[in-house]
């Protein structure tokens, strides 16, 4: 199933968000803080292998709301902030890439009636993205993970999952892929992670 690709309304909305002073200030602070505190990810090199794909699972829902924070009033769980970048195998940033996230809540359950802990966003002109959510609970039979679909403008969708380091369930989960593990660290009551999505051209 394809995303509805980049309607003019969404482009205008993205432009307005990027132009808003609050968004600019928040983005600058978030990425500066991330650079200062998050565990470093490997340097991008020409010829990097594309990010591995992974199953979408049974709980994907189209038409999620556009937002960079999945938190709503009263959302339980440990706060998680993920920042990163979408690039090609040549290391060049992919501006405007569409990222769609969905995950289980702190209780390990997915919201299949509405859009709790679901949302999509667009990478900025440098391919950067930022997501605020909570650490997902453990869904029965799986290790802790977050689903994501990444699509460059007019390109193919990468469907994959993000995993957490040092999870006991990683060893038991046949779908776990080490290359999809977040670079993660704890700061007080907040978990901060980083990940770079590398998209192939095929």
Image: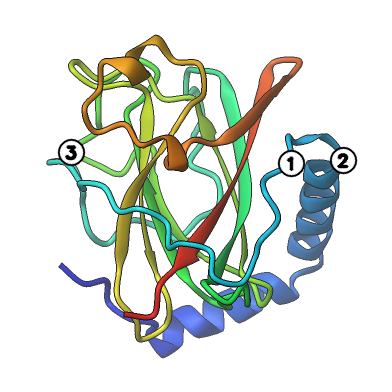
- Report the disc number at residue 36: 2
Residue placed farthest to the bottom in the image? 8
Question: What residue is at 20 percent from the left and 46 percent from the top?
Answer: 55
Question: What residue is at 52 percent from the left and 35 percent from the top?
Answer: 133
Q: Residues within 10 Å of mark 2 (few under 14, many from 20)?
A: few
Residue 170 is situated, as x and y percent measured from the top left of the image, at 35, 20
Q: Is residue 42 above or below residue 14?
A: above
Separation (CA) of disc 1 from disc 3: 37 Å
- Report the disc number at residue 113: 3
> For the residues carrying marks 3 and 2, which lies nearer the camera in this image?
2
Question: What residue is at 31 percent from the left and 44 percent from the top?
Answer: 115
Residue 178 is situated, as x and y percent measured from the top left of the image, at 43, 35
Q: Which residue is mark 1?
A: 40
Q: Is residue 167 above or below residue 150?
A: above
For label 3, the SS is loop
Does residue 31 appear to the left or right of 56 in the view shown?
right
- Do labels 1 and 3 touch, CB within 8 Å? no
Residue 35 or residue 173, whichever sits in front: 173
Does residue 83 appear to the left or right of 141 in the view shown?
right
Classify residue 22 by image quadrant: bottom right
Q: Is residue 187 above or below residue 24?
A: above
Classify residue 14 by image quadrant: bottom right
- Do labels 1 and 2 touch, CB within 8 Å? no
Does residue 202 appear to the left or right of 62 in the view shown?
right
């Amino acid at each position: 199933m394809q995303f509805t690709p980049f309607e003019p309304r969404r482009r205008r909305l993205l432009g307005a968000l990027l132009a808003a002073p609050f968004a600019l200030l928040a983005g600058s602070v978030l990425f500066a803080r991330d650079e200062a505190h998050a565990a470093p990810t490997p340097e991008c090199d020409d010829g990097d292998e594309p990010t591995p794909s992974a199953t979408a699972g049974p709980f994907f829902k189209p038409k999620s709301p556009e937002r960079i924070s999945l938190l709503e009033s009263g959302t339980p769980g440990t706060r998680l902030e993920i920042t990163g970048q979408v690039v090609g195998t040549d290391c060049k940033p992919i501006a405007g890439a569409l990222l769609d996230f969905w995950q289980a809540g702190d209780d390990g359950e997915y919201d299949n009636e509405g859009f709790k802990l679901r949302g999509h966003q667009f990478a900025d002109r440098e391919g950067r993205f930022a997501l605020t959510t909570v650490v997902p609970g453990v869904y029965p039979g799986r290790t802790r993970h977050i689903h994501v679909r990444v699509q460059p403008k007019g390109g193919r969708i990468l469907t994959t999952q993000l995993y957490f380091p040092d999870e006991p369930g990683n060893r038991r989960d046949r779908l776990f892929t080490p290359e999809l593990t977040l670079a993660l660290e704890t700061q007080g009551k907040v978990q901060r992670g980083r990940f770079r999505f590398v998209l192939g051209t095929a």
